[in-house]
Amino acid sequence: MSKLLDLPEHLLHHLEWETTRFKLDLRNPLIMGIVNVTPDSFSDPGEFLQARVAIDHAAQLLKDGAHILDIGGESSRPGATPISAADEWERVGEVLREVIKWDVPISLDSYRLETQLRALDLGVDIINDIWALQREGAIKRLQTYKCGVCLMHMQGEPSTMQRTPLQGTNKEAFASVKNFLSIRIKALEDAAFSARRIVVDPGIGFGKTVDQNLYLLKNQAELLELGYPLLIGWSRKSTLGQVTGCAVGERLAPSLAALVMALERGAKILRVHDVRESYQALEIWQAVQCS
């Protein structure tokens, strides 16, 4: 077992993520494999739109080392056009019905309460919400389930977020992200959510400039002061392309570099496309911690 990062005292007891069917041990970081059942994802547009192809891809991600599968039916890339709840379910419903049988933690990447509830009624374990459960009625309804939740920061919405990113200095933008997450945490705590059900995500690339994203990574450990585990998603993000000049399909090395830096700064769940390589990087990091 890897040595634990030096965590604040109030976080030492919070190393388990309670979900619908599983209590996930966060003493060692976990890999969350991305399954985009969408025609317009920034990273793999249309590649896994067909349910059978998406299911096969999900199975491969598990073989490659994924601990959690994150299934999404709507792209949240900058400039993405929203779809209807019916269209979203048409994409993810069949996939969810199959993967829920596999006895592995299943996450739904959706901000729509209607879709979230349908997935939870199937037995989905985690709701990964880019809107941090801000939709009307979301907290009250999800409180009645036992699912884990991920609260993410996003400036604006996907269709406009990169046209009007966070304002101010990098330090001010970081403070804004931290404050937002603190407010959303309190909203769930006030609704009697168990603390062990909650993780947070600063939302790399969601309404933030390149410099702001890099500053978030550099200072990520400060987010541990919130008292909740961090889910981090740097995989193939545009900031990596801006820094290196790499196209989306060429961002494996930059993604792994960001992953390791996120680990060093306390990340507990790593949301990635390239599971096999990410798992190998995690193995090396863990081996060093044990040396």
Image (tube, rainbow, N blue to C red):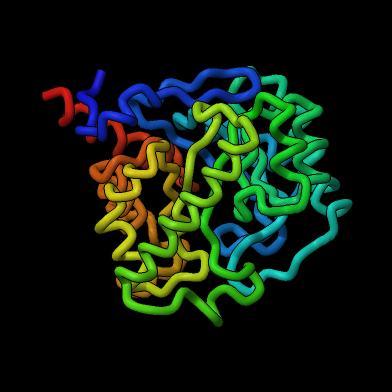
Q: Where is residue 136? Give x, y as percent.
A: 77, 52
Frontmost residue, 160 versus 182: 182
| x 48%, y 44%: residue | 200
Considering only vertical position in the picture, is 167 above or below 138?
below
Q: Is residue 14 visible?
A: yes
Quarter-of-image position of residue 190 = top right
90 horizontally vs 284: left or right: right
Quadrant housing the C terminus: top left
The number of callouts visible is: 0
User: In the displayed image of the protein, which residue is found farthest to the left?
Assistant: 291
Q: Quadrant of residue 147?
A: top right
- Residue 130 place in picture, x, y as percent: 60, 54
- Residue 85 screen position, x and y as percent: 84, 53
Could you tell me which quadrant the N terminus lies in? top left
Q: Is residue 266 above or below residue 210?
A: above
| Picture layout, residue 203 above or below residue 14 | below
